[in-house]
Amino acid sequence: MNHSNWEAVIGLEIHVQLSTNSKIFSASSTAFGAEPNDQANEIDLGLPGTLPAVNSGIFPKAIAFGICIDANISKTSRFDRKNYFYPDLPKGYQITQMEIPIVTNGKIEIKPITGGSKTIRINRAHLEEDAGKSIHGLIPNMTGIDLNRAGIPLLEIVSEPDMRNAEEAEIYAKSIHQLVTYLSISDGNMAEGSFRCDANVSVRNRGETVLGVRTETKNINSFKFLKNAINYEIDRQITILESGAKVEQETRLYDSVKNETRPMRSKETATDYRYFPEPDLLPVVLDEAYIEEIRLTLPELPTQKKDRYSQDYDLNEEEVFFLSNDLDLAEYFEECVRLTGDAKQSANWLKGEMASRLSKHEITIREAPVSANNLSRIIIRIADGTISSKIGKKIFSAIWENNGMEVDHLIEEKNLSQVSDENELQMIVSEIIRNNPKQVKQFLDGKGKLLGYFVGLVMKETSGKANPKQLNELILKRLNSEKKTSP
Ligand code: ADP
Ligand code: MG
């Protein structure tokens, strides 16, 4: 499809689950994975005679986010009722912030791979409760309702329509994800619904300044799906417009199996929801000192961490980016550095062995069977010469497969320490030189590359346990002495 005459416009609404133990207006647990409806009480269900009481733990989290996106923090904000009927919303309304959200007018810098950087404006971030979930397929011929999510605290982050292609939207979503996880205000777990994106997409003729009619594709729970859904929508809308028809403003769903979006309902407007101030809750009043205190206790942020890594460690730009991109990985790395004192080796192992296994098994560093403690042990034992790096990799592999073993114990039990006993190595080297007269002659005739051949043979003989540096020296010495004795 020829896109050159068309420009896409994208704005995202991101729902971030705030990490609290109890719900936004009740004492129900927010823990993931409970049996349906085990974590929904009379307040979450909105039974008559109950009153919500706000969980004050949500405010510092929303404020910290607001500070980090350079936003205005409302000194007085308010909760509103958004009225609608849906089976997963037994109250008949959602408590949200419509008129005066806690965070307004922020911005975030994103860095597209094509270079440079771009500012995405954030219109608002407001606090609200999540709804329940319809469950299809669990009960034959019926839809079940699980209200465990009803009342889960959310921060909804609404961008301005500042993105122009799916890649930018993906980078923006990743930047928000990185920020909320660095701030530890959310676990960001997309598979569990802690981070969901709604993609608003429209297209217009290049050069046009008025926005086109948009669609909103709801509840996208992976970065890949986000990119796919947006690209699908861009193509679909261009096809419609090029045929002379009009795009319907509507809410759509993304089907990740078919990789397409489908209509869900026609777009509702704010008046449909009959918003009004929530009568059961007081306004949220914050003073400057409270906000200042949160500002002063902010944790290290992604860019600060990057700067610190570049300054303190001998790492290249790519390594710094890789290590600081994800907070869990950064913390794992810092633990290794603390234990080994060797940032370069820690980085090498994480970028090499660790990264390739994580991606192979599609798991995160949190789930890695090799702990920072064990990896550090391996690095230390290589550095002090007890094992070769090749054996180090074998040990890493053994611990990975057997889920947690003690490194030193493994070295001893499997007799993996390096053969660095000079006499033993000497004997093996002598035998190999004796058995390969042809190669010895070639070496002495100037084919220096053959040194590697001899090293390889000894390594094979010792199952990789020879100390490489010592071995190189020994073989060279022996070969050179052959030179003197040869006629
Ligand atoms: P609503 O509350 O009805 O969803 P908003 O005005 O709050 O509408 O916008 C929701 C999101 O849609 C925002 O992220 C905004 O940037 C985006 N948006 C609005 N208009 C367009 C458009 N024409 N094309 C793409 N995105 C849009
Ligand atoms: Mg919306």
Image (spheres, rainbow, N blue to C red):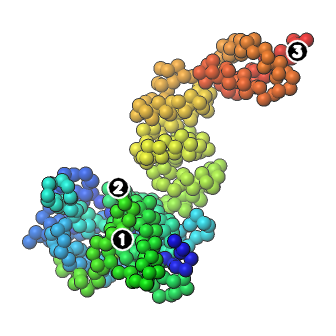
Structural distance between the alpha carbons of marks 2 and 1: 18 Å
Q: Nearer the viewer, residue 275 or 221?
A: 221
Structural distance between the alpha carbons of marks 3 and 2: 69 Å
Q: Quadrant of residue 272?
A: bottom left
Q: Which residue is mark 2?
A: 191
Q: Secondary structure at mark 1?
A: strand
Amino acid type assigned to the residue bearing label 3 in the image:
Lys
Question: CB of mark 2 within 8 Å of CB of mark 1?
Answer: no
- Residue 330 appearing in the image: yes
Q: Earlier in the sequence, mark 3 or mark 1?
A: 1
Q: Which residue is mark 3?
A: 484
- Residue 71 appearing in the image: no
Q: Residue at x 28, y 65 (%)?
A: 153
Structural distance between the alpha carbons of marks 3 and 1: 80 Å
How many dots with numbers? 3
- Number of residues whose C-alpha sits closer than 10 Å to that of mark 3, classed few (under 14), some (14–19) or many (20 or more): few
Left or right: residue 169 versus residue 29 is right
Question: CB of mark 3 within 8 Å of CB of mark 2?
Answer: no
Amino acid type assigned to the residue bearing label 2 in the image:
Ala
Q: Earlier in the sequence, mark 3 or mark 2?
A: 2
Q: Is residue 52 above or below residue 409?
A: below
Instruction: Return the x and y of residue 365 as percentages of the image width and height.
Output: 45, 46
Instruction: Return the x and y of residue 324 as percentages of the image width and height.
Output: 53, 55
Q: Is residue 80 above or below residue 34?
A: below
Amino acid type assigned to the residue bearing label 1 in the image:
Thr
Image quarter of the C terminus? top right
Left or right: residue 316 versus residue 251 is right
Mark nearest the camera among 2 and 1 is 1
Res. 217 mark: 1
Instruction: Return the x and y of residue 125 as percentages of the image width and height.
Output: 37, 74
